[in-house]
């Protein structure tokens, strides 16, 4: 059936693509020249006429294109223009302009020559040719729509993520745009009357965790490498949890083989169900987790399988958009505090990087103070912070309900320290009992949080208790996974079946006979207490 | 800490509240008069000046208000104005103006005098004083922001949902704004090359199902009733699934007691975990499900407990916003087909109602054709449709993996028939094997669907196979819950442990020895197949 209002889409596409040709070429365009510093972005309304309407024939033809065709047509409509923005790998801590070692994002490289971390570094001078108001309006104009790929919370910031990738190579599930929940009742009842407390539910997402944000970037870049005939035939990881779920889902969306290595007999089928369902090739190997890691490193050195490991800096480019999105959802007001659970410690740096780019490009005038929250059972960063950043010692991580951050020797330690030092940051920790109680109290006010969120909420409770966080401070707690992934630990808590834990806030069901009088008695008792 | 850019919020608030005073009073306002028919809505940009800026003192004071205080201040800033829109209960099929029986939404009433269904009916003549362009722009301007309560996908359409409720009484978790996923690979590989196929993931949400959309409306109205001192002390339901989860979460957010009746020994703790965690008073009763239903009806007749049952028409007001949101995400283009799984059949009517309001108020010029998809094991609507709507017979529902639609005698049968007759609609069905295979195939292309979505996808496959749905038709499949709620059935499928089912698309893990050579052999074999 023919669309009756196709022209509306074209208005929107024009804004989403706006792509920002090089200013020096602006007068050669048939599209309107992009606004430069000091000019305002023309906000697109449904009723506005496009500045350069498509001829009728082109519009009719476009109605038969799908959204990806449409995106490619726009992206390549001026093939002779250079793409005005760029990014490359540099050793962590180096600068785009001054780095003596750097790699194209089209190279397959995980570490610098000296073995240190890499960072995706953007050409800030080209981004700076547009002012903060321009970027704010551009990002706002794209939110939540279906214009490929800009409706995604990640790709609505494409110029800041992977500027040079063609829309045709992007693998997106419209990730991001996640719920920024006003924790009104939790703040009022449990955090000494805080009334500007928010939980950023990054886990209310396609695969149920914040890993989607990074994985769309990694898998998109791998997809590009494959299209460029680079030696890649699939992507592999050794992970029991959210990483393998996100990797498998994005690879499935693109038709790229994904390979997941897991220790046999140490993993339940419930932990496997996402990669299995998403068509990953799951190898159940007769060893432990470290054995799997060793094998996948050896195998990926021999076979053209891209390694989706935790030191990968592409993923952080997606994760940083959660910070930008928080600012956007607050109408570009800056919160006072952002609290992030930390294990391998990439995420705290990603948040820092997102906020810092917004400040450097003048979308906002300051950045929030960051808090990294660790489980006491896996707290090497906390110990390092407490000894005044004097000496870092890995720890042997003990079991924690916050299983995704059960890491004793975090890959991104340098990144985290940099983020904290530059944001007047703080590190806190949570015992198992504290994190489970915080999770239960949050749930009792209408959330359905994961244990990692319990760690972050414990940090909030402690900092508020000590008066470090003030009663009117706008504070955002980052929730990294959906509680539906952690029902077993909730069941254990509410059944009071956790050794050595009181489970103070457990709320078990009440057994009643199937008798009107008996039910009435129980209910009257309950309602009497409540009134 | 003081906010450095509070003024930005005020611009946005001005648009979100745009309170739409009565046009006859427009010249008495200090705020700009609302645009009437033919006038365009002033799209708010971050850089625009507000039409009537707050005095500096008011702005500074407002910085200490939380978002709810701020909302109340705006809502009540003109206390003498009547609220220009209204809605009331009328018997299903009656009209706002001509109904001889009607009830205020502040009455506690579930059925009409004759025992038939009720419908929330809006005063369309007052809504019609604003044109389609106005409504489109108003809704677009609110999306995804944190201005209470308009960032929610439901409450961004407040005037069409519960026009008279104060923002102070609204209980919201920023529901809605859910992912409209472009099912590129599923369409291409499994549906004969469809390239404009979309899945509306209503289950990527606060409690993991579309029930949030209706429950925010029901619980908000109950909250208002309690504040108005009406005889309500809590809300009850008898449900094993998504309804009790959503009810408990929203009641927890508001601090309203919620009561859930469940049959003892028939429910696993996993099914209970959401209401338990969200602090519901869960009665485990020594009877079956029908026994629970009977008891809760008896008890709510005696005690002031509001019944959140499936015939409740308030919930449909929230659910209808998913239809409006689909149009909005497509930049107000109308898809050709929308496919909705159906059990109790309220949802198919809610979608119809949302689309119909958009057409009647000229946001769009037509409505999509609707398809209701039933499990073959619980298919009374399908049988009714197949016999030419001649005679409706309830069936005894057999067990289905699509457990939320395992209903033989649907409450909303009349509503569904009305929706289908008025949208040139179709009913399809899916066997257990068909729905599980469709779910598995969808998952293998990057989704993580629930069995109900499998039912809807089966309907799509059949209609496409028969040529009813064309290869270029823009088609939206409604996904009602997150796959994370249905991991048990996925595990059973991929383990091939379902009696009598081939589980054709199962993808079990592969066992390998912890040996480099063995792993390499297995991987080479796999990659050889793939290339």
Image (tube, coloured by chain):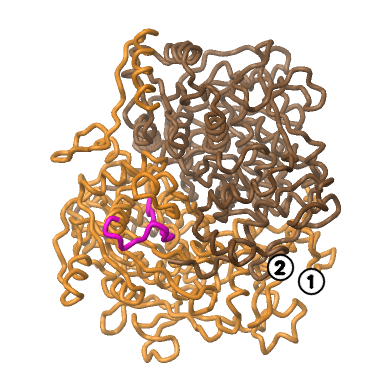
Chain colours: A brown, B orange
Above/below status of B131 relative to A330 = below
Residue B155: image location, x then y, percent: 54, 65
Q: Is residue A72 left or right of residue A92?
A: left
Label 2 secondary element: helix
The numbered disc on residue A18 is none
Nearer-the-camera pick, B498 or A296:
A296
* Mark 2 and mark 1: Cα distance apart in space: 9 Å
Q: Pointer 1: what residue?
A: B51
* Residue B308 forms part of the magenta stretch: no
Q: Quadrant of the C terminus of chain A?
A: bottom left
Relative depth, front residue between B205 and B292: B205
Label 1 chain ID: B
Q: Which of B152 and A147 is in front in this view?
A: A147
Discs 2, 1 touching: Cβ within 8 Å: yes
Magenta region, residue range: B465-482
**Residue drawn at point x = 62 percent, y = 31 percent:** A316
Residue at numbered disc 2: B14
Q: Residues within 10 Å of mark 1 (few under 14, many from 20)?
A: few
Which element is circle 1 on?
A: loop
Residue occupying image coordinates x 82% and y 23%? A98
Please name the predominant secondary structure of the magenta segment in the image: loop
Number of marks: 2
Please give the chain letter of the residue carrying mark 2.
B
Verify whether residue B476 appears in magenta. yes
Give residue A368's position: percent from left, percent from top.
Answer: 73, 40
Residue at image point 42% right, 49% down: B208
Q: Quadrant of residue A494?
A: top left
Question: Residue A68: x percent and y percent?
Answer: 53, 48
Chain-order first, disc 2 or disc 1: 2
Q: Position of residue A81 (x, y in %)?
A: 74, 43
């Amino acid at each position: 059936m023919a669309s009756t209002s196709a022209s509306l889409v074209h208005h929107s596409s024009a804004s989403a693509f706006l792509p920002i040709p090089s200013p020096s070429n602006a007068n050669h365009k048939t599209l309107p020249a992009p606004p430069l510093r000091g000019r305002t972005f023309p906000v697109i309304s449904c009723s506005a006429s496009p500045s350069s309407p498509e001829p009728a024939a082109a519009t009719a033809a476009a109605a038969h294109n799908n959204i990806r065709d449409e995106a490619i047509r726009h992206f390549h409509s001026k093939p002779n223009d250079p793409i005005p923005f760029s990014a490359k790998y540099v050793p962590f801590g180096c600068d785009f302009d001054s780095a003596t070692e750097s790699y194209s994002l089209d190279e397959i490289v995980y570490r610098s020559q000296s073995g240190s971390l890499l960072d995706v570094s953007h050409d800030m001078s080209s981004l700076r040719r547009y002012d903060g108001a321009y970027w704010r309006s551009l990002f706002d104009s794209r939110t939540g729509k279906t214009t490929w790929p800009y409706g995604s919370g990640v790709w609505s910031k494409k110029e800041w993520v992977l500027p040079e990738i063609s829309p045709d190579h992007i693998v997106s599930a419209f990730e991001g745009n996640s719920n920024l929940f006003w924790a009104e009742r939790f703040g009022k009842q449990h955090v000494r009357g805080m009334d500007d407390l928010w939980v950023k539910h990054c886990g209310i997402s396609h695969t149920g965790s914040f890993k989607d944000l990074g994985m769309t970037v990694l898998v998109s870049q791998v997809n590009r490498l494959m299209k460029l005939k680079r030696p890649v035939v699939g992507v592999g990881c050794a992970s029991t949890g959210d990483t393998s779920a996100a990797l498998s889902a994005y690879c499935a969306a693109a038709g790229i083989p994904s390979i997941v290595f897991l220790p046999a007999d140490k993993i339940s089928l419930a932990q496997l169900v996402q990669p299995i369902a998403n068509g990953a090739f799951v190898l159940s190997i007769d060893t432990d987790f470290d054995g799997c890691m060793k094998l996948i490193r050896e195998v990926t050195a021999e076979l053209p399988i891209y390694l989706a490991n935790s030191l990968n800096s592409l993923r952080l480019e997606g994760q940083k958009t959660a910070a930008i999105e928080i600012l956007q959802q607050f109408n570009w007001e800056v919160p006072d505090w952002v609290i992030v659970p930390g294990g391998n410690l990439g995420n705290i740096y990603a948040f820092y990087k997102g906020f810092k780019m917004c400040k450097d490009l003048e979308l906002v005038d300051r950045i929030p103070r960051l808090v990294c929250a660790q489980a006491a059972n896996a707290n090497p960063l906390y110990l390092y912070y407490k000894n005044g950043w004097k000496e870092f010692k890995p720890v042997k991580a003990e079991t924690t309900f916050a299983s995704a951050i059960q890491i004793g020797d975090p890959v991104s330690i340098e990144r985290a320290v940099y983020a904290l030092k530059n944001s007047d940051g703080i590190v806190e920790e949570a015992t198992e009992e504290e994190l489970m109680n915080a999770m239960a109290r949050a749930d009792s006010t209408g959330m359905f949080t994961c244990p990692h969120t319990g760690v972050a909420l414990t940090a909030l409770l402690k900092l508020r208790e000590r008066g470090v966080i003030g009663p009117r401070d706008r504070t955002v707690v980052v929730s990294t996974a959906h509680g539906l992934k952690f029902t077993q630990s909730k069941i254990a808590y509410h059944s009071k079946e956790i050794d050595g834990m009181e489970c103070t806030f457990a709320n078990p069901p009440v057994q009643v006979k199937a008798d009107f009088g008996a039910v009435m008695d129980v209910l009257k008792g309950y309602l009497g207490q409540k009134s």
